[in-house]
Amino acid sequence: MSRPEKPKQLLSLTAEETMLQLTVGRASGSRFSDPIVVANAFHAELVEEQVAATGASLKALVLEPIGRNTAPAIALAALAAGGGSDPILIMPSDHVIADIAAFHASIDSAMPLVNDGWLITFGITPDSAETGYGWIKIGEEALSPGVHRVDSFVEKPPRDRAEAMLASGDHAWNGGIFLFRADMYLAALEEFAPEMLVAAQQSMEKARREGVRIFPEAESFAACPSDSIDYAVMEKAARVAVVPVAMGWSDVGSWDALHAISNPDAGGNVVRGDVVAIEATNCLVQSEPGKRVALVGVEDLIVVVSGADVLVLPRGRSQEVKKLIDAMKD
Amino acid sequence: MSRPEKPKQLLSLTAEETMLQLTVGRASGSRFSDPIVVANAFHAELVEEQVAATGASLKALVLEPIGRNTAPAIALAALAAGGGSDPILIMPSDHVIADIAAFHASIDSAMPLVNDGWLITFGITPDSAETGYGWIKIGEEALSPGVHRVDSFVEKPPRDRAEAMLASGDHAWNGGIFLFRADMYLAALEEFAPEMLVAAQQSMEKARREGVRIFPEAESFAACPSDSIDYAVMEKAARVAVVPVAMGWSDVGSWDALHAISNPDAGGNVVRGDVVAIEATNCLVQSEPGKRVALVGVEDLIVVVSGADVLVLPRGRSQEVKKLIDAMKD
């Protein structure tokens, strides 16, 4: 279902709301100012429509002319926020957080250190030995209640290492959610990735603006090195802290992940759309308006209907969708 | 896929041609005159288009105002054929016959008795203990080479009886294919179902005609008793004979039946349409133009995509599609 013209962020996968809308909703209320969204220029209208439908107003919609990974994207956001001492909460908009109260409480825990200039990452309490995620070893010493030093970052570990980290109890998944003052992030960029900061600044100085839309100047931004915030900043900066949190987080990285975070019906089925299931158990069916899916006597299947495409595979193998996409490209 | 507005006869299930087209092709060549098709008035245009696409010309298209089962439908055909001594070959147009040479040879065997006034049915050599079919017990005595008296008809037997008949070697499935002189069929109707004959005659006398189209008058035809040729005639008439024949016959009565008569690929899959199968085995996939189906790592599944509908069920359970239709009606 996720395609370049309509990526996961803009789809309704876990609720009636799209994942972008759920993300906006997670940062609404009096403690938050209006959101800044950084997106690909191609998605400007869909993003505006979806945010407007939540009732929220955009502070800015920064439209990247080209992708340069997360560190430059966050630099654009920090600059769009004014680059001052106001804290900015960075959230990927294709994640699910089931326990928003726990998330907000973890933000509360982090705020004293954020205000003091620390760069905060949220460490997701792991429940499986994921080899596709970055992990964080949580330092023993608590800097303040609920906030720890980062002992080390571990990128996409092999299976045995992941299992050891899961068993250890002192490791967390790196959920890609960050909280820091805009000025502190820009200062860290100046120290560890000065070319990136210059490129971001130039592209924003020469940006075209239309209402809330900001179009960073393409040539300067294209000259920006491409790197993740983890590599470019978090793994290098000294005053980096982690807030461990169990908040029902998922990046919905596969159909199996979607099944795992959903509430099944009495037959164990998770169903979205017009579905007739007879003697079907433990299936995930994702359809769309105007399509009808009928299952009879099957179990542990994933069935997805999107546009002119139908996908059928067993639960537990949804990582292999990538194989399929490659085969289709061939 | 089979719906009132486009029943199985008018679908391409086993080949590029529709089942009606395959049926027309089975009775083409110099030994056959142009076909008479009896159909529901609703399907007139589709039938004409599909027959024309085969290159055949219709002798007549008899358009029933209402269904009255096979005995009256065949009466209309016999009357449209002129009601004389010319033999007529009656074929349901939703069956598959893989070995047309065997079928034609069985017609050759039957012709002497047909010309002599006998009513001939074709007895399909059974390969499973079907409980949904009518069976024929083949008489021991051969009337002429390859043609036997019918000992008895057995309607939809229970499982144990079907198994005994399969094991016996002297039983055949009643394939619903018949061969007799038009006048002999009408004479049999006069004897065993005189009201039916009168109704059919009256509706044809008052019929409206447009080119090859014949519209039997509705009121007379509606007054016709509804019955099958088996009950109304074949089980009652004295001079009834059966030609046992193994000709790769199937009524394609289920998706499992379609899988059974199709040639699978190296992975055991039978696929029609735009299908990508990765590590999928022994599946049947039936799609349609403009739709794409992707299977990963599944086995023994039936997947059908038709219009806005997607059906997924395991092989071996396709008889349960009826349950599904009932559930959908509810």
Image (spheres, coloured by chain):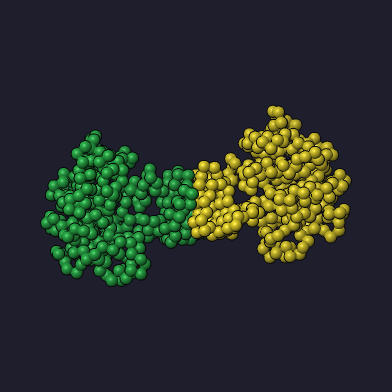
Chain colours: A green, B yellow
Q: Position of residue A162 (x, y in %)?
A: 33, 67
Residue A53 seen in the figure: no
Q: Is residue A146 above or below residue A43?
A: below
Along the viewing direction, whichever of B116 and A3 lies nearer the viewer: A3
Q: Is residue B85 left or right of residue B6?
A: right
Residue A189 seen in the figure: yes
Which quadrant of the figure has residue A36?
top left
The residue at the point 80 percent across, 43 percent down is B185
Along the viewing direction, whichever of A33 and A189 lies nearer the viewer: A189
The residue at the point 35 percent across, 63 percent down is A131
Q: Residue furthest top?
A: B210
Q: Is residue A46 above or below residue B277?
A: above
Q: Is residue A201 left or right of residue B56?
A: left
Q: Is residue A116 left or right of residue B313?
A: left
Q: Position of residue A3 (x, y in %)?
A: 40, 46
Along the viewing direction, whichever of B94 and A134 lies nearer the viewer: A134
Count the numbered circles shown: 0
Along the viewing direction, whichever of B85 and B71 lies nearer the viewer: B85
Which quadrant of the figure has residue A125?
bottom left
Q: Residue furthest left?
A: A116
The residue at the point 80 percent across, 47 percent down is B107
Q: Is residue B215 above or below residue A43?
A: above
Q: Position of residue B235 (x, y in %)?
A: 77, 52
Q: Position of residue B147 (x, y in %)?
A: 83, 53
Q: Is residue A199 left or right of residue A254?
A: left
The residue at the point 28 percent across, 49 percent down is A226
